[in-house]
Image: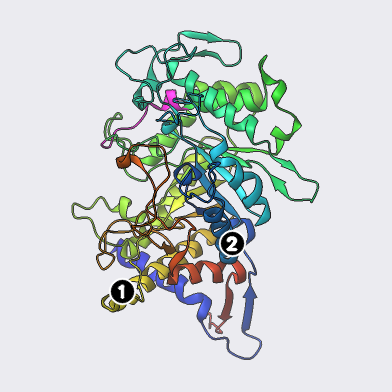
Amino acid sequence: MQRFHWLLALCACLLLPTLPAAAGPNAATTTTGPLGEFMGMVVRDPHYEWKTNAAFPDGANRAFFDALGRNLEAAGVRWVRIEFFAEEFAEGNGVDLRGRVNVEKYAYFINEVAPRHNLKVLALLATPLVRQRPVGDALRFPDPEYDTGEYINPERLEDPLTINTADYGYVNAYMHIWLDNAFTIAASFPYVRRADGRWQGIAAYEVLNEQNRYLGGGGRGLAPLAVATLQTKFYRTFKINRGPSWSRFGAWVENVRIITGGLHPDRCDDCPNRMTDRQYLDALYKTSAFQTFRRQHGRYPFDGVGYHPYAAEMRNALVPEETAYADLYRVPPRMQELRQVMLANGDATTNIWITEIGDRGAPVLPEYPSTATRIDNERRQADFLRAMYWIMWQNRDYVERVFWFKYEDFAVPADPTQTGPENWGIVRLRPRDAADSCPQPYPPERRTCEYDADGAVWRYKEAFRAYQDIARNGWTIHSTYLPLSVR
């Protein structure tokens, strides 16, 4: 019965923007207009497009990111999320960056493409930021089981804090590497206004990703105290207590936003009593790290709370389905419950950032007539997008922006006529021609040259046009007020 009521409410919400207006004094029309910075998008990470185009031997695939920028602006995107990675492979250029971040991979997109197309950058700093460094590096992880360039188990974030540093206070080896790489990124991309009036650099940082059910963890989560400690050290060091090495930073840090990692909406399997996302957020608020910071500064150490309200993950179904469209009714009450956790902890001023939300839609491909039947699949994805943005717009008093997941389909299937789990994008990019060599200096099995080197779009899906319409026009809401007889 509860599901039935929510479905009725959702249907009413979805129909509301298109109801015809009746003439007369009881009719009203409201136009929201462009949604501006409410509109975000998760996009192709520059890390994967490094040296994928022989026309640019210096590394940055300018053609790919020029096309990306044009399409994002055309869609009405205002914020983009990209992820940073520590290096796994040495490139043979005389500098071994394994375990460190090669900031050159990201510079063209952040410093040139994003300002040109009025895009603000949210940088995701998650567990791929921590890989083993070479022998002799001062921050080489002490555990001998890790070879240089190897990904370090995220649960080492929970190790005791035994290393006393000048910049961060007490940390463990995992935190030390993460913080060093994070601040290398921040120092490389200051958020400043250029001479042409456009903003350049990184506007916001997201600390970790789905830490309550981390990627590759099989349902496990990271201890709330360890997560809160890392968040607090990053925020405190960046915004308040800058250490001896902070001469590379300036007043521009006040323009930067720092948010918590987007929580997964499912349970943390190895947390006490299998914490829900709401319980995990409450546990974060109640950690000694957050509470101490709040006593000292009158606020919590973040400027936004990240969340990923995937409706299908709220379902806890045993059988995965292609779409979560039928589960949209679960999202509004979950958002309200999350907000209540924030309010119960005295946090009425921080907003929620939806840093991922999406649904799949297999594309119709003109070269393959057999895919024409997918038009309903594409429309269902577009309808999901419209519904989700409408739901979030109704909660804009505490939802600050929404990042659709994602711009491009994860990959191009070997058989384009087949559907699969990779169809989350609002576009399908053209696959790389078999004759087009991949110049990446990595082992063949780890190369990332699956797309056309120029980033050409194969199919702009219905979801692209739906996003574009919402971003440009918002909603025109026609309402008819019927006279009510009160006895």
- Name the residue: 32% across, 44% down: 266
- Number of residues whose C-alpha sits closer than 10 Å to that of mark 1, classed few (under 14), some (14–19) or many (20 or more): some
Judged left or right of residue 191, residue 304 is left
The magenta span reads 218-227
* Residue at the spot of label 1: 374
Residue 245 on image: x %, y %: 66, 17
- Number of residues whose C-alpha sits closer than 10 Å to that of mark 2, classed few (under 14), some (14–19) or many (20 or more): some
* Residue at the spot of label 2: 70
Residue 275 on image: x %, y %: 32, 35
- Name the residue: 55% across, 71% down: 469
Question: With respect to residue 127, does 80 lie above or below?
Answer: below
In front of the other: 170 or 73 = 73
Judged left or right of residue 131, residue 187 is right
Question: With respect to residue 406, does 288 lie above or below?
Answer: above
* Residue 285 seen in render: yes
In front of the other: 51 or 216 = 51
In front of the other: 25 or 220 = 220
User: What's the magenta bit mostly, secondary-structure-wise?
Assistant: loop
Residue 221 is inside the magenta segment:
yes
- Name the residue: 78% across, 50% down: 197
Judged left or right of residue 175, residue 201 is right
